[in-house]
Image (cartoon, helix red, strand yellow):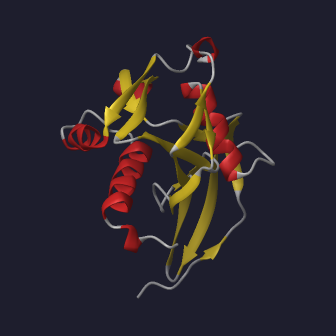
Amino acid sequence: MIAKPKLGPREVVYQNPYQEIYRVKAQFDGFAKDIYVLDCGRRVGVVIVRGNDVLLVRQYRLLINDLAWEIPGGKVDPNETLEAAACREALEETCLRCRNVKPLMYFHPGLDTCDNPTNMFFAEEFDEVPEENLDSREVSERVWVPLDECLRMIFSGKIMDSLTVVALLAYHTRRHHPELFPA
């Protein structure tokens, strides 16, 4: 069994307003290695539901050089609650003002070199605001899609974003197996 290493200080090697990369030397029994961590900060996402439909947005993503279907989500601002961040992201990306967001789940997209703790919420209550408030620099369109179709989109590769995949599968599980979720 590998014992926990002794960790050296955190050394920032790159930083911009959205992320930082830092190096930590980990000294194990008999060997050492430098570990580089991408820290993107805390993130939220929100599954917005109307009956059996979920609201998806399309956004350009560099790594696929294409538009991607996603749920609204993004970074939590300093001194912002998780719920407030989920509501703000929903408003910015969908022109819907969510009310009564409820926790869905918490996860880490990776535990090795990506520090991006993520809280997922869902909202079944919302108010429309004028669509001209939609940030067209970020979102190209928004579409209500039946949850079952969202699941088909996941398994056919049309939805690839991990935040969206995890959230939609969790919401589907919550709907069909509420006993698995804390009250």
Is 93 on the left-hand or right-hand side of 141?
A: right
For residue 19, say whether it is visible.
no
Q: Would you identify the image quadrant in which residue 60 lies?
A: top left
Is 126 on the left-hand or right-hand side of 151?
A: right
Taking the spot 50% from the left edge, 85% from the top edge, the residue there is 3
In the picture, the quarter occupied by the N terminus is bottom left
Residue 142 % position (x, y): 44, 23
Is 15 on the left-hand or right-hand side of 113?
A: right
The single residue placed furthest to the bottom in the displayed view is 1
- The residue nearer to you, when weighing 40 against 139, is 139
Taking the spot 39% from the left edge, 72% from the top edge, the residue there is 180
- The residue nearer to you, when weighing 155 against 149, is 149
Residue 57 % position (x, y): 44, 27
In the picture shown, does residue 29 fall above or below 41? below
In the picture shown, does residue 179 fall above or below 108? below
In the picture shown, does residue 168 fall above or below 59? below
Residue 106 % position (x, y): 52, 61
Q: How many numbered discs? A: 0
Q: Would you identify the image quadrant in which residue 74 lies?
A: top right
